[in-house]
């Protein structure tokens, strides 16, 4: 993994203060993702990171590595230029 991505992911992890456990289901289509990392930057609670992914033409895609911190705010969904992200609430998740 490149140093830039590693540094980004390390910074992002500092945003995880308290799990919300809203039962978020975060679906990212790695074939639509163009590895811009905008969603990773805008997520206020550090749910997303960039990870190596051979299904992506740039070999990296965003992934929801810490969904328990998701507040269902939808910032990542609105920010993604390629409509690659869907965030839903799982059945039975807390209000
Ligand atoms: S904003 Fe969309 S295209 Fe950019 S990294 Fe996130 S999922 Fe991929
Ligand atoms: S919905 Fe909000 S909290 Fe959840 S992953 Fe997207 S930006 Fe982060």
Image: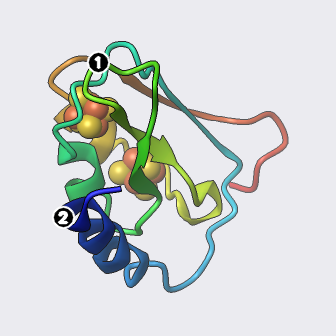
Residue drawn at the location 58% of the way across and 60% of the way down: 66
Coordinates of residue 79 in the picture (x, y in percent): 18, 37
The disc, 1 or 2, on the residue closer to the chain's N-terminal end is 2
Q: Give the Cα distance between marks 1 and 2.
A: 18 Å
State left or right for residue 74 relative to residue 75: right
Which disc is residue 4 wearing?
A: 2
Q: Where is residue 60 in the image (x, y as percent from the top left)?
A: 34, 37
Where disc 1 sits, the SS reads: loop
Nearer to me, 78 or 3:
3
Instruction: Name the residue that disc number 1 marks.
Output: 57
Q: Quick check: 75 left or right of 17?
A: left
> Viewed as shown, does residue 45 lie left or right of 43?
right
Kindly state the secondary structure of the residue where label 2 is placed: helix
Residue 73 can be seen in this image:
no
The location of residue 50, given as percent across then percent down, is 36, 50
Q: Residues within 10 Å of mark 2 (few under 14, many from 20)?
A: few
Colour pattern of the rendering: rainbow
- Pick the quarter of the image with the C terminus: bottom right
Q: From this view, report whether residue 61 is shown above or below residue 83.
A: below
| Residue displayed at 65% across by 61% down | 68
Q: In this view, does 51 lie above or below 86?
A: below
> Taking the image as drawn, is residue 85 in sight?
yes
Q: Residue furthest right?
A: 92
Task: Give the position of the N terminus as an image quadrant.
Answer: bottom left
């Amino acid at each position: 993994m490149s140093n830039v991505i590693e540094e980004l992911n390390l910074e992002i992890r500092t945003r995880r203060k308290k799990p919300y456990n809203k039962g978020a289901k975060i679906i990212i289509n790695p074939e639509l993702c163009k590895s811009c990392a905008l969603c990773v930057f805008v997520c206020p609670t550090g749910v997303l990171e960039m990870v190596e992914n051979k299904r992506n033409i740039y070999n990296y895609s965003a992934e929801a590595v810490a969904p328990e911190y998701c507040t269902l705010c939808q910032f990542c969904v609105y920010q993604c230029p390629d409509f690659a992200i869907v965030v839903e609430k799982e059945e039975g998740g807390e209000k």
